Image: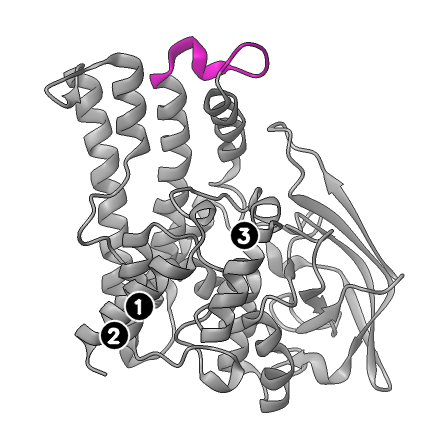
């Protein structure tokens, strides 16, 4: 099948199989569990997984679609044009899956990847600890090899979705005498054991996506060590690059036939009025335009870097651009949406519209995006040292 035929087949399949409730909406990771825990979402996942389109460019042997890069790009464009939500989401697809494809053994890939593509298993991340956030390599959670298992003791924090997760990828210290960037190992850990306790943390926005996670002689199998013992820092850094690479590594679909939705422009028109289809206030119009142009620039940059990565097959330090700019735009966008609504942009409860109430919660929630997942300051340091080559 040539690419034009593939595009038509893909468009027809999406039109027929993606439920209406799984279109024309944005989902933040804090809301993902509720959004994907519906009958329509499960139907959408089942249909896509059967075709291999939860992970369209992963190898077919692991439940992926086996698409070429060109086909993957077309798939992403048609998904965007259909305004369909991904059939599955989470750290399995975006983080640990690509990492296993690069670092995992054949047995590890065969065991874990098909359960990710089918949506059978959900994953969470065990990186940060109290006192070891931006300085992640100072972590203290300890793992001791005892026969065929690692015995784990310690605590993680900000473990997103841990209360719903089946497995965790976790950084542990396996050689306390080694320098802090050494002596760290990367393990996969079954969350369904009594030695693991999770406690959700309620945030100022009212949601509780993050958890404290405690290990009291928790067990991880020896064969679930990823990479070499005491060399987990290399794996951990690569996983973060996969997380930050975003759409650029999968083709970076951009809508073609339909104009992109611009919720900020719509809010400005709804609350401030419009003249001949344009935002009435020229100052606000300029601000919305600048924000929209930066979003578009980020998307195109991600796509360009994805093209550059074809030669290496893996993302690099430049992915910190996406985390830095993406989180900044998210934070500024939420602030702008609230500002445009005026006093109704501060709604918390009472006689307000649903989207006004959600916007206030989102504004509070997004104050944190430049902190979690690697602070903006950390990203700037990475870019300065590893992309620009500036001295320490």
Residue 389, visible in the rendered structure:
no
Residues in magenta, as a range: 340-352
Is there CB contact under 8 Å for labels 1 and 2?
yes
Residue 208, visible in the rendered structure:
yes
Binning the other alpha carbons within 10 Å of mark 2 as few (below 14), some (14 to 19) or many (20 upward) gives some
The residue pinned by badge 2 equals 6
User: Residue at point 23% right, 63% down?
Assistant: 304
Figure quadrant of the C terminus: bottom left
The residue pinned by badge 3 equals 40
Q: Secondary structure at mark 3?
A: helix
The residue nearer to you, when weighing 117 against 195, is 117
Q: Describe residue 87's horizontal placement relative to residue 274 as left or right.
A: right
Locate residue 246: give its quadrant. Answer: bottom left
Q: Secondary structure at mark 2?
A: helix
Q: Describe residue 312's horizontal placement relative to residue 90 as left or right.
A: left
Nearest to N terminus: mark 3 or mark 1: 1
Binning the other alpha carbons within 10 Å of mark 3 as few (below 14), some (14 to 19) or many (20 upward) gives some
User: Residue at point 31% right, 62% down?
Assistant: 76
> Which label sits on residue 10?
1
């Amino acid at each position: 099948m040539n690419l034009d035929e593939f595009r038509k087949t893909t468009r027809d399949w999406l039109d027929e199989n993606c439920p209406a409730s799984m279109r024309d909406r944005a989902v933040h990771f804090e809301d993902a569990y509720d959004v994907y825990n519906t009958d329509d979402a499960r139907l959408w996942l089942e249909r896509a997984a059967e075709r291999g389109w939860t992970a369209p460019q992963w190898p077919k042997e692991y439940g992926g679609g086996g698409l070429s890069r060109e086909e993957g790009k077309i798939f992403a464009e048609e998904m965007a044009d259909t305004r369909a939500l991904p059939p599955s989401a989470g750290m399995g697809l975006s983080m640990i899956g690509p990492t296993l494809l690069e670092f995992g053994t054949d047995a590890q890939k065969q065991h874990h990847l098909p359960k990710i593509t089918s949506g059978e298993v959900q994953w969470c991340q065990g990186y940060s600890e109290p006192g070891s956030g931006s300085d992640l390599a100072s972590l203290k959670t300890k793992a001791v090899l005892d026969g065929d298992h690692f015995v784990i003791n310690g605590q993680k924090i900000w473990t997103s979705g841990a209360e719903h997760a089946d497995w965790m990828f976790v950084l542990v210290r396996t050689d306390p005498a080694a320098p802090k960037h050494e002596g760290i190992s990367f393990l996969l850990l079954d969350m369904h054991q009594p030695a693991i306790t999770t406690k959700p943390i309620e945030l100022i926005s009212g949601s509780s996506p993050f958890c404290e996670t405690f290990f009291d002689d928790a067990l991880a199998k020896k064969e679930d060590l990823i990479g070499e013992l005491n060399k987990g820092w290399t794996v951990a850094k690569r996983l973060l690059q996969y997380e930050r690479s975003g759409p650029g590594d999968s083709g970076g679909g951009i809508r073609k036939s339909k104009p992109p939705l611009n919720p900020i422009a719509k809010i400005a028109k709804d609350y401030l009025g419009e003249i001949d289809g344009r935002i009435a206030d020229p100052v606000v119009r300029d601000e919305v335009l600048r924000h929209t142009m930066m979003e578009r620039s980020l998307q195109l940059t991600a796509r360009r870097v994805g093209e550059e990565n074809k030669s290496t097959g893996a993302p690099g330090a430049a992915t910190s651009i996406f985390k830095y700019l993406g989180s900044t735009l998210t934070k500024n966008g939420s602030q702008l949406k609230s500002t445009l609504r005026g006093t109704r942009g501060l709604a918390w409860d009472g006689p307000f519209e649903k989207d006004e109430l959600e916007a206030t919660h989102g504004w509070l929630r997004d104050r944190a995006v430049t902190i979690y997942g690697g602070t903006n300051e950390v990203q700037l340091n990475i870019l300065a040292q590893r992309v620009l080559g500036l001295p320490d």
